[in-house]
């Protein structure tokens, strides 16, 4: 039996925007394309059970499995890639009126090097997106 390949991504970002404004952007699934740069199609009302299909030629589905506005969202990849993928976004209010974001992603696969390879692409992509989100939030 093959060992499972595992990877964890932990991204942190501080925004000079109140938690409600940051949450509004994180919770706007279709609007993710503005800061993440990926094609996103949404099925559902935005709450638990909402499915966002990400990509164009190669697509995968992320399903929201937990949601606690304006502080926390958990999603899992439910179609499209040979991995178990769980993402959690947590927002915390800062004393200065800003918001700290913590995005943790756990990836597992039975295919050797698959989870680590996905993490190598995913981590810088999301990090760039979080930087772009800061620009969007601070432009208002």
Image (cartoon, rainbow, N blue to C red):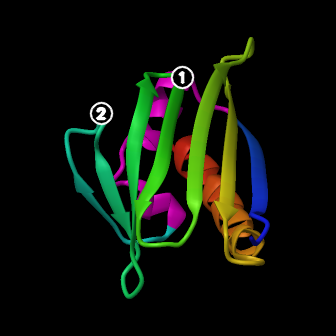
Q: What secondary structure is marked by label 1?
A: loop
Q: Is residue 33 magenta?
A: yes
Q: Quadrant of residue 83?
A: bottom right
Q: What secondary structure is marked by label 2?
A: loop
Residue under pointer 1: 71
User: Do callouts 1 and 2 mark residues in contact (Cβ within 8 Å)?
Assistant: no
Residue under pointer 2: 47
Magenta residues (range)? 15-36
> Could you tell which of marks 1 and 2 lies nearer the N-terminus?
2
Q: Residue at x 59, y 37 (%)?
A: 89
Q: Where residue 18 appears, x then y in whole percent?
A: 57, 23
Q: Residue at x 71, y 59 (%)?
A: 127
Per the rendering, the mark at residue 93 is: none
Q: Is residue 53 magenta?
A: no
Vertical order, 32 against 44 (above or below): below
Q: Where residue 116 appears, x then y in whole percent?
A: 77, 70
């Amino acid at each position: 039996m093959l060992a499972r390949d595992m990877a964890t991504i932990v991204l942190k970002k501080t925004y000079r925007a109140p938690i409600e404004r940051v949450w509004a952007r994180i919770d706007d699934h279709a609007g993710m394309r503005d800061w993440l740069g990926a094609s996103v199609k949404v099925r559902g009302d935005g709450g638990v059970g909402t499915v966002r299909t990400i990509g164009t030629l190669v697509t995968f589905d992320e399903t929201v499995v937990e949601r606690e506005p304006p502080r926390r969202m958990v999603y899992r990849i439910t179609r499209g890639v040979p991995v178990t993928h769980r993402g959690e976004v947590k927002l915390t209010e800062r004393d200065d009126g800003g918001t700290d974001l913590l995005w943790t992603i756990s990836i597992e696969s039975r295919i050797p090097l698959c989870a680590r390879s996905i993490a190598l692409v995913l981590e810088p992509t999301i990090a760039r997106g979080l930087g772009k989100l800061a620009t969007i939030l601070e432009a208002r």
